[in-house]
Image: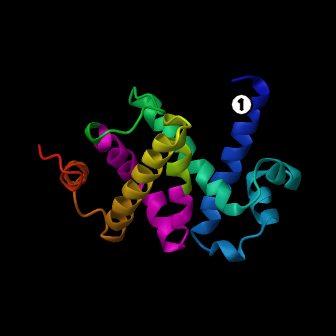
């Protein structure tokens, strides 16, 4: 990543962190772009050069957290999803549970799905079957994650990965 790209990523992270901090006290509808950029110490044009909506900022943050987590755990973050690596998906989401709970408290679940899709889509080719397969896994995993979050992360990561296998007809 070149210097310009690193600077852009850093500024995007600053804006994401600022939005998350403000979200802890205000619903997204009441948060203004000037409020975000002031806290992030960037200009308004920086926001609009990189994002079109506040939701997009949250999606960016989740994707960035996944990339970092995958790197720290020696995973290829673009590795194709399989039933055997479902545990990685749940481990990652458990590691960001505070952020996910905030996102759910603010009814911004669509940002989580958008992030999953953004991460999963490059794993698949452009033929129709692979596109359907990508959508299937991203919606299915989002559905399971959605319920897991709503239940307060009650089941363990391992139990959730096992649930995926059972649902897909692969008993271990």
How far across and how far down the image is residue 113, in percent? 51, 57
How far across and how far down the image is residue 70, in percent? 44, 34
Residue 91 image-quadrant placement: top left
Residue under the image location 56 percent in, 46 percent down: 118
Q: Is residue 99 magenta?
A: yes
How far across and how far down the image is residue 156, in percent? 22, 54
Determine whether 60 is above or below 23 in the image: above
Q: Which residues are magenta?
A: 85-113
Color style of the picture: rainbow
Which one is in front, 54 or 163? Answer: 163
Residue under the image location 60 percent in, 73 percent down: 25
Q: Quadrant of the C terminus?
A: top left
Residue under the image location 53 percent in, 34 percent down: 125
114 on left or right of 29: left
Q: Which residue is mark 1?
A: 6
Magenta stretch: helix, strand or loop mostly: helix
9 on left or right of 138: right
Mark 1 residue element: helix
């Amino acid at each position: 990543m070149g210097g310009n790209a690193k600077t852009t990523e850093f500024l995007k992270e600053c804006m994401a962190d600022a939005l998350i901090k403000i979200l802890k006290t205000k619903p997204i509808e009441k948060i203004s772009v000037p409020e975000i950029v002031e806290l992030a110490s960037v200009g308004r044009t920086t926001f609009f050069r990189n994002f079109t909506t506040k939701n997009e900022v949250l999606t960016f943050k989740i994707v960035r957290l996944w990339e970092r987590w995958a790197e720290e755990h020696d995973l290829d973050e673009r590795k194709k999803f399989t039933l055997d690596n479902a545990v990685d998906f749940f481990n990652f989401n458990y590691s960001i549970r505070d952020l996910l709970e905030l996102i759910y408290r603010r009814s911004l679940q669509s940002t989580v799905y958008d992030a999953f899709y953004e991460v999963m889509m490059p794993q698949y080719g452009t033929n129709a079957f692979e596109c359907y397969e990508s959508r299937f896994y991203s919606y299915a995993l989002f559905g399971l994650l959605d319920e897991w979050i709503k239940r307060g992360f009650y089941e363990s990561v391992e139990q959730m990965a096992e649930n995926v296998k059972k649902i897909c007809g692969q008993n271990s």
